Image (cartoon, rainbow, N blue to C red):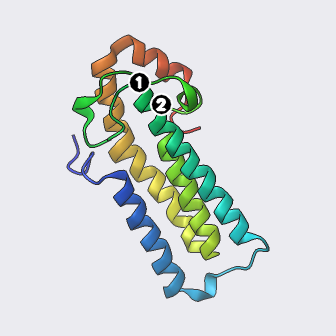
């Protein structure tokens, strides 16, 4: 397993990315753009992202398992209902939407460039290690779920 795998909590990754987005927006002000309604769009994306996260955590609570990605050994059940019917990682999709909203709020081109970097990092160092553990723990049931529901959306 890679040394970075599962080491940095997803919320910390979001904070780091959001700070980097802010930083680049201040360092290179020439790449700022103007979009009517960008603040409204930013808030809407943030609300949808937060809602997805809450729905994901709620499904984990209903299933009486941990939503903590740093405590994978405590996972006691495979959650496939609710928002997990549409995405295997709705909480991470929610984080991306929050960052997308932040990028619109900043209205800076480089802020958007950091989004795919966040997604690639999350996929490689968070989601793939989680998937390996879930495959070991839940076997064919998890494999069937992988075949039915997409990783992101």
Residue 113 locus on image (x, y percent): 55, 66
Residue 5 locus on image (x, y percent): 26, 46
In the image as oriented, which residue stretches furthest toward the top? 140
**Residue at 59% across, 38% down:** 153
Residue 108 appears in the picture as rendered: no
**Residue at 57% across, 32% down:** 83
Tell me if label 1 and label 2 are in contact, CB under 8 Å: yes
Residue 21 locus on image (x, y percent): 49, 72
Residue 13 appears in the picture as rendered: yes
From this view, report whether residue 103 is shown above or below residue 94: below
Q: Which mark is residue 89?
A: none
Residue under label 2, please give it. Answer: 59
Looking at this view, is 60 or 15 the one in front?
60
Question: On the picture, is 61 further left or further right than 25?
Answer: left
At mark 2, the secondary structure is helix
Residue 101 locus on image (x, y percent): 61, 63
Residue under label 1, please give it. Answer: 63
Q: CA distance from mark 1 to mark 2?
A: 6 Å
**Residue at 32% across, 41% down:** 69
């Amino acid at each position: 397993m890679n040394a970075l795998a599962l080491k940095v909590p997803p919320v910390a990754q979001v904070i780091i990315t959001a700070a980097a987005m802010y930083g680049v927006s201040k360092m290179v002000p020439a790449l700022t753009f103007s979009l009517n309604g960008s603040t409204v769009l930013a808030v809407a994306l943030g609300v949808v992202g937060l809602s997805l996260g809450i729905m994901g955590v709620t499904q984990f609570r209903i299933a009486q398992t941990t939503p903590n990605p740093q405590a994978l050994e405590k996972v006691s059940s495979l959650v496939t209902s609710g928002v997990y019917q549409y995405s295997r990682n709705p909480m991470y999709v929610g984080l991306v939407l929050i960052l997308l909203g932040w990028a619109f709020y900043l209205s800076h081109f480089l802020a958007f460039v950091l989004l795919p970097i966040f997604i690639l990092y999350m996929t490689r160092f968070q989601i793939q290690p989680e998937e390996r553990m879930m495959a070991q723990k839940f076997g064919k049931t998890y494999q069937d779920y992988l075949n039915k529901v997409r990783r992101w959306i």
